[in-house]
């Protein structure tokens, strides 16, 4: 028997690193940021910012060390545009950022909150100042999506989480041109019953490409009498056939335990949409929404996550 569970992520002692109090204009809450390392090493977070109507927009925060001294845009960076994109009527949320070398642009895959529920929308930017919208690529109800950074066998790939019934699973879909999406494949199923990831799962930050496969951090939602519990787990997928799961962790690796994660607008939620991997190729800065109210930073290691997954039972023995 192990003496204790492994700690794959360590919270930064300055957590929460960003709150509404840091914002240069009035906002209610800031959470669920996408993240990238810019070419000069600056960390850019594209934060979900909720106003007092309850609608969200996205705003950029930049820092040299990814921890503090954030420079936050003085006005919303990327706003919903319901006049041209009616599916953004109730705001835009939860961006996942991917640098795409073939286009020399960053892809932003985000939730467009339409009158008929959340859908998946795509935009590109070179500088986080001007944005090129592709509109909704997956209709409601669908969210928790990210673009893979390069084509696989000539096809772009988006991971997403459609809802159809009481359980919601992760899917992957392909496109020759980023506009027309098909070849939909089930990627990872929510488990059932008592499992921590029963009922609903979804991609957290975009997959990390490693020689062993696509390393995926995902969230699982457990519905309890006291409300939902959002926790994180790990899975590994084949590099060439990313719908093929090679390994899936049995235990969650990170869950709400600090007061700022347990209490807020929506308590008991840790919800990352972005991470950065340092120049060493190993150190991961995971940026997460805490209780839909503030932003936390947890530090981990690609190598340690892969080693942990290696020790998990084979996928065929992982019962759901
Ligand atoms: C999910 C998303 C997230 C949110 C989470 C907890 O469904 O809407 O934006 O952080 O619920 O409320």
Image (tube, helix red, strand yellow):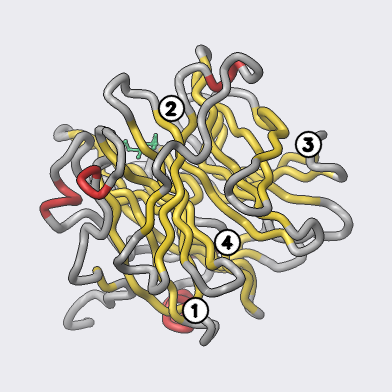
Q: Earlier in the sequence, mark 1 or mark 2?
A: 2
Q: Do callouts 3 and 4 mark residues in contact (Cβ within 8 Å)?
A: no
Q: Which mark is residue 306?
A: none
Q: How many tags in the picture?
A: 4
Residue tagged by mark 2? 166
Which residue is most to the bottom? 280
Q: Earlier in the sequence, mark 3 or mark 4?
A: 3
Q: Is residue 48 left or right of residue 179?
A: left
Q: Earlier in the sequence, mark 1 or mark 3?
A: 3
Residue tagged by mark 1? 278
Q: Position of residue 279 (x, y in %)?
A: 53, 83
Q: Earlier in the sequence, mark 2 or mark 4?
A: 2
Q: Residue at x 36, y 49 (%)?
A: 271
* Nearest the eye: 65 or 164: 65
Residue tagged by mark 4? 207
Q: Position of residue 34 (x, y in %)?
A: 48, 52
The 10 Å Cα crowd at callout 3, few under 14, some 14 to 19, many 20 or more, is: some
Ligand 1 within 8 angstroms of badge 4 C-beta: no
Residue tagged by mark 3? 181
Q: Residue at x 46, y 25 (%)?
A: 91
Ligand 1 within 8 angstroms of badge 2 C-beta: no
Structural distance between the alpha carbons of marks 3 and 4: 19 Å
**What is the secondary structure assignment of the residue under circle 1?**
loop
Q: Do callouts 2 and 4 mark residues in contact (Cβ within 8 Å)?
A: no
Q: Residue at x 38, y 74 (%)?
A: 65
Q: Position of residue 190 (x, y in %)?
A: 46, 44
Structural distance between the alpha carbons of marks 4 and 1: 15 Å
């Amino acid at each position: 028997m192990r003496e204790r569970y492994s700690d794959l992520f360590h919270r930064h002692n300055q957590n929460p690193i960003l709150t509404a109090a840091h914002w240069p204009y009035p906002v209610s809450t800031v959470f669920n940021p996408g993240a990238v390392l810019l070419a000069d090493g600056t960390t850019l977070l594209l934060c979900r910012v909720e106003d007092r109507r309850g609608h969200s927009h996205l705003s950029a925060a930049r820092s040299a060390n990814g921890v503090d001294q954030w420079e936050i845009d003085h006005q919303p960076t990327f706003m919903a545009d319901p006049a041209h994109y009616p599916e953004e009527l109730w705001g835009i949320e939860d961006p996942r950022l991917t640098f795409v070398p073939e286009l020399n642009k960053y892809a932003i895959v985000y939730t467009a909150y339409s009158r008929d529920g959340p859908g998946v929308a795509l935009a590109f930017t070179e500088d986080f100042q001007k944005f090129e919208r592709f509109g909704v690529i997956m209709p409601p109800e669908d969210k928790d999506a990210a673009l893979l950074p390069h084509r696989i066998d000539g096809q772009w790939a988006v991971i997403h989480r459609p809802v159809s019934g009481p359980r919601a699973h992760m899917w992957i879909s392909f496109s020759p041109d980023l506009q027309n999406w098909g070849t939909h494949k089930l990627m990872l199923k929510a488990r059932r019953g008592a499992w921590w990831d029963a009922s609903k799962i979804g991609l957290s930050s975009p997959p990390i490409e490693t020689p062993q496969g696509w390393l995926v951090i995902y969230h699982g939602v457990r519905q309890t009498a006291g409300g939902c519990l959002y926790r994180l787990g790990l899975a590994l997928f084949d590099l060439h056939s990313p719908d093929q799961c090679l390994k899936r962790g049995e235990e969650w690796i990170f869950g709400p335990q600090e007061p700022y994660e347990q209490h807020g607008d929506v308590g008991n939620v840790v919800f990352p949409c972005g991470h950065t991997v340092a120049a060493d190729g190993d150190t991961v800065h995971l940026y997460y929404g805490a209780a839909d109210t503030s932003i936390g930073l947890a530090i981990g290691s690609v190598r340690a996550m892969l080693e942990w997954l290696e020790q998990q039972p084979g996928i065929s023995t992982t019962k759901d």
